[in-house]
Amino acid sequence: MPRRSIIVIVAFHIVVLCCPSPLWAGTQPIVTTDLLRIRTVTSIDVAKDGSRAVFAVRSIASQPVQDTDDPLAEPTHRYQSHLFLVDLSDPQAAVRQLTFGERRDGVPKFSPDGRNIAFVRDAETAPSRALSKKPSKEDGPASQVWLIAADGGEARQLTNFQHGCSDAQWSPDGGRILVSSSIPIDEIEGTPPWPMERPNRTWKDAPLADGVAPRADGTRQQIRAWLERNAADENPNVINRIEFQDEQHLRGPMRFAHLFAIDPDAPNAPIEQLAARQITTGFYDHQQAAFMPDGKSVVYAAKKPVDQHIDRVLATSLWRVDIENGHDRLVLALDGWTLESPQPSRDGAVIAFSGQRMDEPAFRQTQLGIASIKGETVSEPVWLTDEGTFMGSVRSFEWMQLQPALVFTTGMRGGFPLMTVSPGLIEPATLVSQADGMPVGVHAFGIGGGAVVYSVTSASNPCVLKIRDGRGERVAYDLNPWVAEKNLSLPVGGEITRPDGTKVQYWLMEPINREPGKKYPLVLEIHGGPSAMWGPGEFTMWHEFQLLCSWGFGVVYSNPRGSGGYGYAFQHGNFQDWGEGPGGDALAAVDQAALKDWVDQDRLVITGGSYAGYLTVWIIAHDRRFKAAVAQRGVYDFETFFGEGNAWRLVGWAMGGPPHDARFKQVIERNNPMNFVTRIKTPLLIKHASEDLRTGVSQSEMLYRALKDLGQPVEYVRYPGEGHDLSRNGDPLRRMDRLNRMIEWFERWVENPRTAPVATSSN
């Protein structure tokens, strides 16, 4: 059957939107620098008795440049995170801030008695303390665990790990805190049981001790030791792993996350004397650990290969280690599955966990399962969110304390609802899903007593903290009260039925202050992943969408086939079809939006990042309706992506096999944007971060060089010192540059008579 052309595939069945896009009542426009004002909750914990909650708030602090005569000098911006406390027993209680200053404090956890809070503080913002070794770039910031009284006071440092630590968990009796620290391979006794994969070499066969002096002109053994010393200093990087890239740097020597038990009740002891006892061993990561209710053992997730290199193993299983004797035993393993995040019930009779089939990792959903534990025997798992009937992937979950049920978040149909499920329920029940008739996003939550505390993103506010308890539901803390001053555009959703029967959900946002009878430009925004999902509850795009509407652009976005949140079949819908099918879905949303009398079909523009950078380039190579395009951090050549990106496995998962396998050559070439570069006539701005190792950088250079050679209108922007997550976690100034540069590019090619939104004194 011949492939349908891009013209035919945009046909759709219209679902009419009966109501206009509502506007928020504020008077001030959203401006670029409002990015610096957005605050969000990153983690929440609720005391066991439900009396109070602690949460971490991420924000951006700005400091004017000192000692300069330049009145226009840019201030410096830095991320910070502080802890806040709220009394849940008093609906009128004010939120109280616990930590201050140039800090990045997060992941707070109440002690079982609720008196103390353990949390993680990044070392680069902590008071100076001598470490026994300067962390390498592989270490990153040497985060440590700190302790603060819930009633307030000075925090004290609890750990002093050479390589930093994270994931603090209290034992049920409060007598221990469990932490994780990544240990370099040369500091672990013995050798891995799995192959080294270094040609004709064996583990630790060039010792830097035992009297072997490294010498460039010595014996063969001394020369080998000299070469090893250079490699240990990453001068040069010697690569033997198939997984040799992190997000922004090449990986250094291998390291493995191990679990340590520390005593939080050693007050006044010098930090160097606080004992931290390692309770795990071996050459693999011990992840997502949790105490069993008796406090004598810990469950965790790990992959423990024997006959193949650990990089080649995807599946993980659940394990249990006794704290006193270090005895390690398997809890649950399922052939062809990865199992993660074990959480025992209050009595330890049941363990909950997440699981995903590994036969099609790009398309399978993460499911929530439980299994009964009787001594050393574990029952067959029961899946509470079976992908055959449940559309979303489970994101995070927690046991309720007053009943044998679980609360969890998931991504589903454009929202990130908070749901509950138990073995007695036929299907999960929804706790929080909508506000003002639109999906919302619950991105963090905590449970204690009968209270659920959660942070929620809605179309009208990027983050609000709410409480749900016996009194009902109420706002505990509005993190962004300045939004009330703002004139916002609220999305209106619809659904398109494509010619093949696929139903595609989309949303349309009007320009603010739209005047009847006038035409306005429209931006098609596309999400990445490709299995990501957008909706009114998507926090990461809240400011960008509102900023475009403030400038006088309409915004349309959709969840084309391949998106998560609509079930396995829909997510599998882009298998061996990254371009034509999803591109047609996105264009159908544009066609639907164009039925509005305010949309100027001669002023359409398009943008997207990562996979959406791919789809942006694919679309403009096959469709001429857009006057300008911005492709960001994209994949443009599969063969190159397979070699330079740390997400290289996605090529085989999405296309059926790797580029060097002749069986998949044809399908890869058919989906490869670089093969259609001569068709691109749309003015294109290409953006990439110089340290982006997720998709790699050279593909963007290839695309730019080809279009420049062809004489097409193209511009290329590189952001130094940034990785793939520039738009979400990059330097705030560069994040603002990215937004303004995109709008400036659009306005080179489409007329926009709207006056630029300007910050007022109240901003």
Image: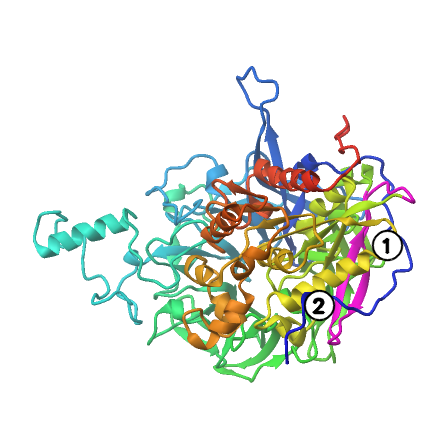
Q: Residue at x 85, y 38 (%)?
A: 26
Q: Where is 165 relative to 388, above or below?
A: above
Q: Is residue 21 above or below residue 515?
A: below
Residue placed at 62% from the left, 81% from the top?
A: 382
Task: Name the colour scheme.
Answer: rainbow
- Residue 432 painted magenta: no
Q: Which SS class for mark 2?
A: loop
Query: Which amino acid, mark 1?
Result: Lys
Q: How many marks?
A: 2
Which residue range is magenta in the image? 488-517
Instruction: Tell me the amino acid under the disc marked 2.
Output: Leu
Residue 332 in the figure: left or right of residue 433: left
Residue 582 percent across, percent down from the top left: 66, 66
Which residue position is annotated with label 2? 402
Question: Label 1, on which residue?
Answer: 596
Question: Closer to the N terminus: mark 1 or mark 2?
Answer: 2
Classify residue 488 as left or right of residue 347. Answer: right
Using a 10 Å C-alpha cutoff, classify the residue at mark 2 as few (fewer than 14 neighbours), some (14 to 19) or many (20 or more): few
Q: Residue 718 location in percent, x, y?
A: 51, 42
Q: Is residue 409 visible?
A: no
Please state which of the two labelled residues, at mark 1 or mark 2, is closer to the viewer: 1
Q: Nearer the viewer, residue 169 or 617?
A: 617
Q: Quadrant of the N terminus?
A: bottom right
Q: Please provide percent x and percent y for residue 305.
A: 37, 73
